[in-house]
Image: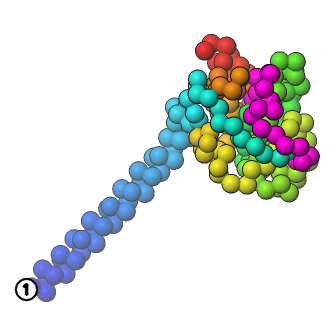
Amino acid sequence: MSGIWLVSYIALWAVVLFQGVVIFVLLRQLGVIYLGTAQGVANDGLDVGTEAPDFSVSGLDGEPLSLASFRGAPLVLIFGSPTCAPCRGLIPDLNAFAQDRAEELRVLFLSRSDDESARRFASEQNIEVPIAAHPDEELPNKYEARVTPFGFLVDDGVIRAKGLTNNREHLELLLRNAAAN
């Protein structure tokens, strides 16, 4: 009889472990789904009113770019990636937005990639705004930008607005939110 108890004890623990794995997977999936919601994304990024972290990157033309090099006009800082489908869809809107608002602000696209991938992306997508590559997570981590395309409106070194920037309306929303703050 002790053999039956041992088998049932092992089977019970196997069931408990299996349920633990299933619960972990379901909770993780719930977290991934939450990140895709407006509420989940709204929690991304440094808080509005926070001093924007300085950075130093090289533009695709080799020109050094830093937050300080954009002082004097508001800067729309977009975190994106060549592998991000919404980023690719954003580019025509971003080009038009930057051209229409050229008198009042500047735009910088920060591509999560190496220089060659960023150059290819810029060429394929006809990106007209300045673009710089950053091959690691250091810069997005400074800004706490987990999703792409994610934008910040920085003015006088301070984050005035932030949010997901999938299209022209989202870009305009950054401006409206900054004006409301």
The magenta span reads 60-76
Q: Is residue 21 left or right of residue 169?
A: left
Q: Nearer the viewer, residue 8 or 27?
A: 27
Residue 63: within the magenta?
yes
Q: Quadrant of the N terminus?
A: bottom left
- Residue for badge 1: 1
Which residue is painted at 18% across and 77% down in the image? 8
Q: Residue at x 74, y 50 (%)?
A: 134
Q: Quadrant of residue 10?
A: bottom left
Mark 1, Cα crowd under 10 Å, few <14 / some 14-19 / many 20+, is few
Compared with 88, 94 (above or below) is above
Question: Residue 28 in the image: x percent, y percent?
Answer: 45, 52
The quadrant in which residue 88 appears is top right
Left or right for 29, reference 60: left
**Among the 4 quarters of the image, the one containing residue 117:** bottom right
Q: Position of residue 124 (x, y in %)?
A: 90, 48
Taking 129 as reference, is 179 above or below it? Answer: above
